[in-house]
Amino acid sequence: MKQVLGRNGEVLTVATAKAKDARPSNVHWLTPRTWRRWIDVGLRGHGRDGVPEPGWVGRLEDRNTAFVRMMVSSGLRRAEGGSLLTFDVPQRRLTGGRYYRGRIAAQVTRSKKLRTFYVSADAIGDVESYIDSSRAWAVRRAQRVDRYVQLPEMRLVTEVTRGLKPVVRWCDQDGVLGQRALDELTVEERMLLFTEGPHGPEPLWLWLNEQGLPLHPHSWDGVFRTANQRCERVLTPPKRLGMDPHKVYAPYATVHSARHSMALFMLVVLNTLMDRRYGLTPEERRDFRLLYGDPWFMVQNLLGHASRETTVDRYLAPVADLQLRSMLADADSPVQVPMPELDGVFARIARESEGIQDIDARMEPTAGGAE
């Protein structure tokens, strides 16, 4: 927060920064099970019976599914998640773990500051599967037709230094050497980075199209639009097609919906862990907040918001006035894996709040949950 002088000379306290697109009309929340339905139907070609429809091809199914699950898990912005390089993806450890930490380069963030993000082990597994399957196939096919060597501009990376401020060193097609701090590379510059693979140059850009070329972050809007159209066609009763403005039958999602939903999910999980798993008394919870910050502050940091106002008033408006402890008080056992086990909690939140889309396993909306 910062203080500014008002038009009448009074001192006002305002947010230091606020997302330019953080308007109520742009905010969409989906519960975890609704995201699973949206992915199955919109990206994996499932019908209402839960199995892929006849004729479904799904050539880019693993790429699209990996991207969405990573975004829902991490809460990254479109430019942040869409411009990842292969070495930006956290590596899973043999010792296991539910979440892994990664870093987002400063130049691709809105604040232009280096930021840490967390992503679930399952989401990383989806990305690894994509890298080893359809991505590898697209790269190999592009190499066979010399698509990469024909590019008008390409930077073949020779080294990425280690340390607090990594530097990327490369050699371009004319043999000219160059280097720049990893944090300073723009989205466009990151798209030019290649590495020498066993069969020739291959992109360091993580998300590729069918031609094996970098997929621009804006292109994900089209993927989501197509998935939304498919969900509407498959899930909406024939008599209600084109007549479901509140998304009662078919979930609707945007790239930014993943960020909104992650904020809601993490708020519920953090409250659950503090109240149930750790069995904190009111006094102990107060001490925990003084030491680590409350769940709202934790979610604000995960999202990289400069202002608490954006986190509370925009991203988490439906639950800003709810006492989550009392909502979770009827749970019989501690939460261990915060996804399917919390479906009941999210269903209740959706029923008692506005704007949260929730569809159960039978593809039926919960009463009063969708908007």
Image (spheres, grey):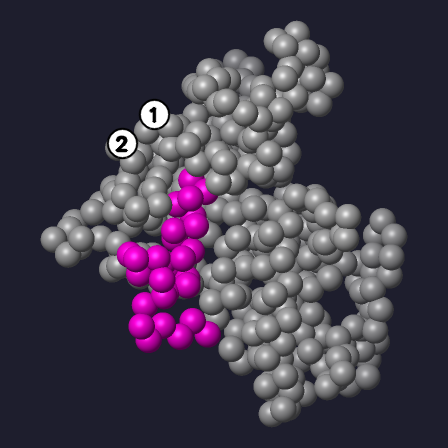
Amino acid identity at mark 2 = Gly
Q: Which element carries disc 2, helix, strand or loop?
A: loop
**Quarter where residue 286 is shown:** top right
Give the residue number, with chain letter if any, for mark 2: 368
Residue 318 placement (x, y as % from top left): 40, 28
Residue 51 is a magenta residue: yes
> What residue occupies the far bottom of the structure in this picture?
145
The answer to whether residue 156 is left or right of residue 28 is: right
> What residue occupies the far top of the structure in this picture?
283
In the rendered image, the vertical position of residue 170 relative to residue 363, given as above or below: below
Residue 134 placement (x, y as % from top left): 56, 74
Magenta stretch: give its range: 31-59
User: Does the CB distance between marks 2 and 1 fall below 8 Å?
Assistant: yes
| Mark 2 to mark 1 CA distance (whole Å) | 7 Å
Q: Residue at x 73, y 86 (%)?
A: 199
Give the residue number, with chain letter if any, for mark 1: 352
> What residue occupies the far left of the structure in this picture?
239
Judge whether residue 278 can be spotted in this image: yes
Residue 343 placement (x, y as % from top left): 44, 36
Residue 355 is a magenta residue: no
Return the disc, 2 or 1, that comes first in the chain's sequence.
1
The C terminus - image quarter: top left
Q: Residue at x 83, y 52 (%)?
A: 165
